[in-house]
Image (cartoon, rainbow, N blue to C red):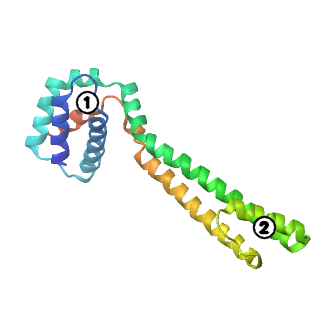
Amino acid sequence: MDKLIASCIDDMRSVDGTLPLAAQIRAYDLLQALSEAVERGIMPSESVSKEFCTVYEVYGAVLEKSYDETALKEQLANELEPFEKAVTEARFEAASIAALHEFAKEVFEIWQTSGIFMRRRALNELRERAGFRLESHRIGNYVAKTFDLANEAQVRFAHAQQTLFAHNVAYKLRPGIYAEINTILSGLQ
């Protein structure tokens, strides 16, 4: 925890203009760690706590003025953009493979109930949509294969969503975090 406090001290000293997103996240993480540590009776070293409070006295007003939620949200949006793109791509991939699976089930039904011309036409369309060769006497296996492909695509989509959610730290953007840290640390001295 002392290292995190030292990092936040460095952040306070280096603030010039607007508070960077990384500094805001570190401050939020420190506040959470301090709250949990105080509940458990674990205290940070006194020298680091005093240094934080001293630096906050000097830079506290600048920190409060440098908090710009709009700028922080823009930084976060830029960082989340590749993850959102991955989610969109995975969603479309999962939807297209699910549609292919549904079509494979329709073709299987046609294969079992229709005449030779309907069967051939449906099988050719299925081969064209699938993009790989399909043997006519194994059409049932194709339904199972597309089901497996749809499940795999759904897993990739869920993984992409979880990655996006893990990187979305919008809940850590709130004003006054350094003041709260200062209050906790000054109360421990």
Note whether 130 is above or below 75 in the view shown.
Answer: below
The answer to which of 93 and 16 lies nearer the viewer is 93
Q: Classify residue 70 as left or right of residue 121.
A: left
Q: Residue at x 65, y 62 (%)?
A: 131
Quarter occupied by residue 53: top left
Tell me: 134 left or right of 73. Answer: right
Q: Position of residue 88 (x, y in %)?
A: 55, 46
The residue closer to the viewer here, 135 or 93, is: 135
**Residue 145: horizontal and vertical position, in percent?**
65, 71
To which residue does mark 1 refer? 179
Does 176 appear above or below 138? above
Outermost residue, right side: 115
Q: Name the quadrant of the C terminus.
A: top left
Q: Position of residue 94 (x, y in %)?
A: 61, 56
Task: Decide: is 111 above or below 70.
Answer: below
Give the residue at x 92% y 71%: 115
